[in-house]
Image (cartoon, grey):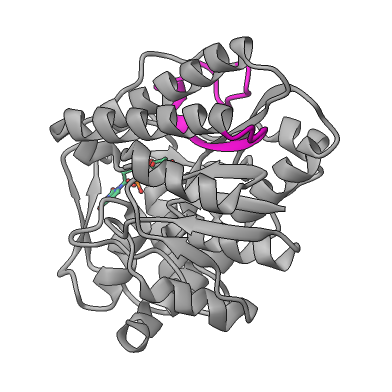
Amino acid sequence: MKVIVTGGAGFIGSHTVVELINNGYTPIIVDDFRNSKPFIINQIFKITGQKPKHYAIDCCNYKDFETVFKIEKPEGIIHFAAYKAVGESVNKPLKYYENNINSLVNVLKLMNEFDVNNLVFSSSCTVYGSAKVIPVTEKTPTQKAESPYGNTKQIGEDILHDYFKTSKNKNISILRYFNPIGAHPSGLIGELPIGTPNNLIPFITQTADGIRKSLTIFGNDYPTRDGSCIRDYIHVVDLAIAHIKAFEKQKNQTSELETYNVGTGKGTSVIEVVECFEKETKIKLNYSFGEKREGDVAEIYADNSKIISELEWEPKYSLQDALKDAWNWQKNLKNVK
Ligand code: WQD
């Protein structure tokens, strides 16, 4: 089954391309490398023995994107291509609305034009905003998003529901990611933050590697067990496999839209992540506590019972595995670029 993977050279995209190849799919990467690097495609080849075709085009450019569909005639699409940093989106809302919404609308228009009936959409737990009840299930009402990034995911899901109502025989799986972390155990692909990392784990590994002087923990007086924010940190390979499971289920459907929380079902605080990293790597991290970051919620983690039962998926890697793989990747980065 040929699958277009937008953002396929990115962090989650590249790990998903590896799992697609491992499961007999033919991924076609569509990525203009604005948030990734071309060498990742060679790394995928080193891991799988296959070098996926790729098109370095912008999904917001309808004409270019249409050409890819004309040539490839895919049967499925995974739409990753989007900006995803909570903090940055607060300062640059238009960058997020323009890119994240336009690219999704183009995906759906092209699905109609070329009769593509299977879509997996990369959504996020940020749609829950500051949930009143934790852990969140797929039925937990979405709150007003705490950031423009989260709002683009809420709007994206609304667009998919409205589109689904007007379309025939479309299968749409909305995957709400919690916090994707770690790297491929081979150490050949991983998170590639360009510039100052927005996310916690790359900031930790860059601090451990001496690239950053110290880590600032944003807030230590939240209403949580140790005052720091709680999140559901999921290994990126577990997350990648959830996409395969979504396609497998779609093969036995004609027209369904389903939403799944993709998380471990466990909450971990920032301080606990730091301590786990130190224990796993025997490296003392230099960190201090700073102001809360705008857009952050105190606590969120998944009730993942729906994806476990309906997609026969469950997380296999632990937080320790993910932090070990992230550190291994950070050390390898010097000689893979
Ligand atoms: C995690 C925690 C920060 C950096 C991410 C993605 C988003 C979505 C959900 C996929 C927070 C704290 C961070 C630092 C810190 N994933 N932190 N110091 O904001 O939960 O959202 O996962 O779609 O796209 O951005 O992740 O890693 O930025 O922050 O204390 O230097 O770490 O305050 O509590 P977040 P994050």
Rendered residue at 60%/66% (across/down): 18
If the image is split into quadrants, where does the C terminus sit? bottom left
Q: Position of residue 320 (x, y in %)?
A: 55, 65
In this view, the residue farthest toward the bottom is 335
Residue 195 image point, x, y percent: 18, 61
Q: Where does residue 302 sit, x and y in percent of width and height?
A: 59, 34
Which of 127/300 is in front?
127
Q: Nearer the viewer, residue 88 or 48?
A: 48
Is residue 293 in view?
Answer: no
Vertical placement of 239 versus 229: above or below?
below
Picture residue at 35% right of the left edge, 20% below the top: 145
Residue 111 x %, y %:
56, 32
* Residue shown at 36% from the left, 71% from the top: 38
User: In this rendering, is residue 292 above or below 43?
Assistant: above
Task: Point out the residue furthest to the right here.
Answer: 252
Residue 174 sits above or below residue 128 on the image: below
Answer left or right for 105 relative to 108.
left
- Residue 120 shown in magenta: yes
Q: Is residue 334 visible?
A: yes
Tell me which residue sits at (34%, 53%) in the image: 57
Stretch in magenta: 114-139
User: Which quarter is ligand 1 in?
Assistant: top left
- Please identify the quarter of the rendering in which residue 266 is found: top right
Asked whether, in this view, residue 213 is left or right of residue 53, the answer is: left
Whether residue 337 sits left or right of residue 89 in the image: it is right
- Residue 40 lies left or right of residue 117; in this view the side is left
- In magenta stretch: residue 195: no
